[in-house]
Amino acid sequence: MLTATELQTRLHQIEQDYLAENDVMKALLLAKLATLEVGGWTEECIDKIVTDFLDNRMLRDKKTVIAKLQRTYGFKYNKDFRSIIVELVGVIGFEKIEDKLSLQCQQLETALDELKHSRDTCAHTYTKPSMTIDGPSKMIKLLTTIENALAAFCNELHKVQIQP
């Protein structure tokens, strides 16, 4: 998986090209690329958190969780992220993590919602000169927020004790 640092480097290059670009369509395509890159990285990061958790636990029914993960094509906080984590540790385990990381979870929810909105604007249409697409600088900020919140969440997730 591409590290967040490598993605940051890639996004900074895209931003430089975006800021230097005089052609509106090329600038929009660069902004779109930045958005799609952060969206793809976020989906893969969440998948990795889940699969790493499964690999570290002796669960009898990993296949059910993996099948649900493979059917999840988004990163909305409640619909996608919360749903798959609850599958791992239950509502009580998830709420323990949320209680401990209240601010980070709120930041993650906000950042994922913003990213989802931006990604949907880019992903469900072709690029038109009249479009408004969030610039690479916003994606860099969202990536930082998402990375920090997911790292804290992942750390707490691995501390959760599951009662038999």
Image: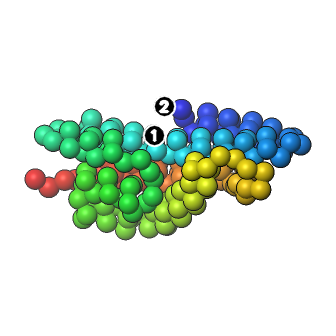
Residue identified by numbered label 1: 44
Residue 144 visible, this orientation: no
Whichever of callouts 2 and 1 sits on the residue coming sooner in the sequence is 2
For label 1, the crowd category at 10 Å Cα-Cα, with few meaning under 14, some 14 to 19 and many 20 or more, is some
Query: For numbered disc 1, what is the local secondary structure?
Result: helix
In percent of the image, x 39 and y 39: which residue is there?
Answer: 48
Residue identified by numbered label 2: 1
Q: Are marks 2 and 1 in contact (CB under 8 Å)?
A: yes
In percent of the image, x 14 and y 55: which residue is there?
Answer: 163
**Viewer-nearest residue: 118 or 98:** 118
Query: Vertical placement of 128 versus 62: above or below?
Result: below
**Viewer-nearest residue: 22 or 84:** 22
Q: Is residue 5 left or right of residue 96?
A: right
For the residue marked with disc 1, what is the amino acid? Answer: Glu
For label 2, the crowd category at 10 Å Cα-Cα, with few meaning under 14, some 14 to 19 and many 20 or more, is few
In percent of the image, x 73 and y 50: which residue is there?
Answer: 128
